[in-house]
Image: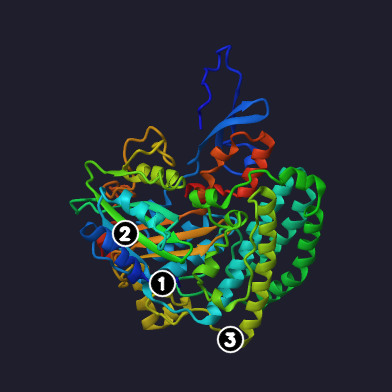
Amino acid sequence: MGTLSNQVVIQKLTARFADKISVPTEPFGLLTLETNAETIAELLRFLKEDKELQFNYLTDITGIHYPEQELAIGVIYHLHSLTHNVRIRIKVFLSAANPSIPTATTLWEGSNWMERETYDFYGVQFEGHPDLRRILNVDDMTVFPMRKEYPLEDPNRVDKKDLFFGR
Amino acid sequence: MNNHPVYTDNDPQKETITLNLGPTHPATHGVFQNVLELDGERIVSGVSTIGYIHRAFEKIAEHRPFYQITPLTDRLNYCSSPINNMGWHMTVEKLLNIQTPKRVDYLRVIIMELSRISDHLICNGILGVDTGAFTGFLYLMEEREHIYEIFEEVCGARLTTNIGRIGGFERDFNDIAFAKIRQFLVKFPPILKEFETLFNRNRIFIERTSGVGAVTAETALNYSWSGPILRATGVDYDVRANEPYASYQDFDFDIPVGTTGDVYDRYIVRNEEMWQSLRIIEQAMQKLEKEPKGVFHADVPEFYLPAKESVYNNMEALIYHFKIVMGEIDTPKTEVYHAVEGGNGELGFYLVNDGGRSPYRLHFRRPSFINYQMYAPMSSGMLLSDAIINMSSLNVIAGELDA
């Protein structure tokens, strides 16, 4: 894999952000950590512009919904340091009532559509985004369809209930 | 974008023409709409509208067992469906910690490289058509047909292949399939050579493509480009080399890069990648000879669907069949990101699993979607005819764009 070990990344990040980031985990070797909406812009800038880390490539931005959590809406960033060939995943959780987070378009132009997609499906408001409109769904849609409260199947069907499938 | 004065259509001061390029324009090769403001033949600004064939795959995937998601991935980049299928299988294998035998990896590599060739054939062939040369396209289409015949021999389908299973393949390659691959390796190189002779140093083709849509490496990285179009700008990022999957580390191949990132460079990079794919397939065929025959899936009965005859005659197979189909297998509660090098770039699968029968969340990182967002900004100032070949060389596939 990469030429930069996860330990080095963790050390640099804890030195800089201390208690603003969560305890990192490494599922399948991919460094994963959580932060809050106030820190994310600064953290992304640090990761991108730090001379040693150089997480210069934004792989993906996407959302997730955990209805039972207090902070139910998650935004997940995947960054990639092409210089070192190391990836990092950053999660931010927001309240479902007011999911608002600073935009990453100031750092990567490419985040424009990724954020529009996340807004389209989860209703995350990216503050400072130049053109936050729906992208894949129709413009007059009123809901954010990837949230868990919107079922896929016809709710009247009884043969496809999850409880019959061990869930 | 949109910084020119905006007049309504009836305003006598309006000097530009509003043109709808798409959604069903023959030159766009798919369902994309671009609303362009034209000053004569030059594009002043443009706005892309996408989502015309959005099918909510991510939502559907949250309600389907893992093995039923494979047919959804077919319909992302339908020019190279096997790469999507196997990318998904490898994601699940990574989640379940399944080690596939080397022979399975090599068989996968053969199929994936064949699909890469068919993907690039379409793109470069169509690029020829868009610049006014139909002949090359017709030469190449015959060869894509032969690739599809190989897929047909392996899995029974041609376009939306649903090839393989979690853990390997549903059946071994038969002798006809191997014979067809060998025949392809003999017959295809002269035709690709002929195609290159038609285009590479063709004065008209160079004049039409050189310098069109040139992008610097910094801009391309800033827009998160990946795949051949990123490599055409000079960045040697290829998932096959950076994070080898399916034993790509066993193979010897080059990553072609361009310099200027214009349409001509993209064309050259794609052509060279086809030669490299052929090299990989040849190596894989040699490596296969040393592997034990008849191994076509990993030995994981709790995840790999058993053969139908053993389900009817064997108690254990029946139990596993039932458990797999009903989703009563135990899966780890964790998350995994796995990327493969698709025809258009880094095709990523982000899977969050809660141990249920279907993913809690599945996100496809679709290269076409991310590559295409630069199209409207980069079209400003371009001639309309240049914008057409620029779109053609981005090789945006509507299925992958909209998911």
Q: Residues within 10 Å of mark 2 (few under 14, many from 20)?
A: many
**Amino acid tagged 3:** Glu
Per the rendering, the mark at residue B94 is: 1
Relative to B354, does residue B266 appear above or below in the rendering? Answer: above
Give the amino acid at mark 1: Lys
Q: Position of residue A126 (x, y in %)?
A: 33, 41
Neighbours of disc 1 within 10 Å: few (<14), some (14-19), many (20+): some
Q: Amino acid at mark 2?
A: Tyr
Q: Position of residue B156 (x, y in %)?
A: 59, 66
Marks 3/2: CA–CA distance: 38 Å
Q: Which residue is rendered at x = 58% and y = 86% of the image?
A: B291
| Front one among A48 and B396 | A48
The chain under label 3 reads B
Q: Is residue B74 left or right of residue B39?
A: left
Residue, disc 3: B291
Q: Secondary structure at mark 2?
A: loop
Which numbered disc, 2 or 1, marks the residue closer to the eye? Answer: 1
Position in image of residue A105 (x %, y %): 41, 44
Q: Earlier in the sequence, mark 2 or mark 1?
A: 1
Residue positioned 68% across, 53% down in the render: B265
At 52% across and 65% down in the image, what residue appears? B239
Q: Secondary structure at mark 3?
A: loop
List x then y, in percent, for residue B241. Answer: 54, 69
Query: Given the image, what chain letter belongs to the residue carrying mark 1?
Result: B
Mark linked to residue B360: 2
Please determine if labels 1 and 3 lie on a single subunit: yes
Q: Nearer the viewer, mark 1 or mark 3?
A: 1
Residue closer to the observer: A110 or B141: A110
Q: Is residue A142 above or below residue B165?
A: above
